[in-house]
Image: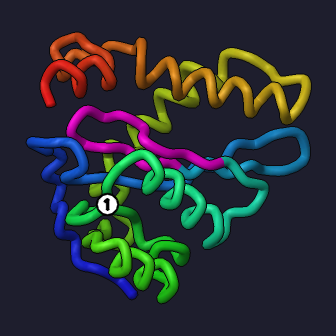
Amino acid sequence: MVSDNVLNRDFHATRPNEKWVTDITYIPYKQKNLYLSAICDLFNNEIIAFHLSTRNDLQLVIDTLEKARKVRKTKGVLLHSDQGYQYTSRHFSKLLKQYKMKASMSRKGNCLDNACMESFFGHFKSECLYIQSFESEEALKTAIDKYIRFYNYDRFQAKLSNLSPVEYRTKVA
């Protein structure tokens, strides 16, 4: 089920849990790919949930959404994604309705409609993945965990008054 582009590139949120964006990126590792799904709160660009899997499937995005639900209230949240088959599935649409969330989707093939997630993944790859090599899958997973913690708690952002996402949420919200 394809949803309208409700977000319409309005990446500004006035409060936490107003607008979330989500996407999946692949991470080449040895002879296979790993897939990282993440959800970002547009209020402060905080990565509120992420999940890593060897499969780019519906369960990956469900696991990410369930992690977000454990740390945040979902009622009334606008969740924006691309039109990947995981997000357009009936099961995912039913989950969003069950959790009282509103779906929004980028126009087909238009990555700029989800620029905030694309930007995060770009920073993640250039600041974490491309500058080191990993001896094991476990070392890669540890580096991902550490980077997202760094991004949320220590990496300041100019548009957040030079605060980290968590500092901004704590001081402003």
Q: Which residues are magenta?
A: 38-51
Q: How many marks?
A: 1
Q: Residues within 10 Å of mark 1 (few under 14, many from 20)?
A: many
Residue type at mark 1?
A: Thr
Residue 96 sits above or below residue 28 on the image: below
Residue 37 percent coordinates (x, y): 56, 52
Q: Main secondary structure of the magenta part?
A: strand
**In the image, residue 56 lies in the stretch drawn in magenta:** no
Given residues 33 and 45, the one toward you in this image is 45
- State the residue at coordinates (30%, 52%): 20
Scheme of image coloration: rainbow
**In the image, residue 47 lies in the stretch drawn in magenta:** yes
State which quarter of the image contains the C terminus: top left
Given residues 110 and 129, the one toward you in this image is 129
Residue 59 percent coordinates (x, y): 65, 69
Residue 101 sits above or below residue 135 on the image: below
Residue 81 sits above or below residue 170 on the image: below
- State the residue at coordinates (29%, 80%): 3
Give the structural element (helix, strand or loop) at label 1: loop
- Is 66 positioned to the left or the right of 105 in the image? right
- Is 135 positioned to the left or the right of 123 in the image? right
State which quarter of the image contains the N terminus: bottom left
- Quarter of the image for residue 129 reads top right
- Is 45 positioned to the left or the right of 58 in the image? left
- Is 173 positioned to the left or the right of 123 in the image? left
- State the residue at coordinates (13%, 52%): 10
Given residues 11 and 31, the one toward you in this image is 11
- Residue projecting furthest to the left: 14
The residue that disc 1 covers is 74
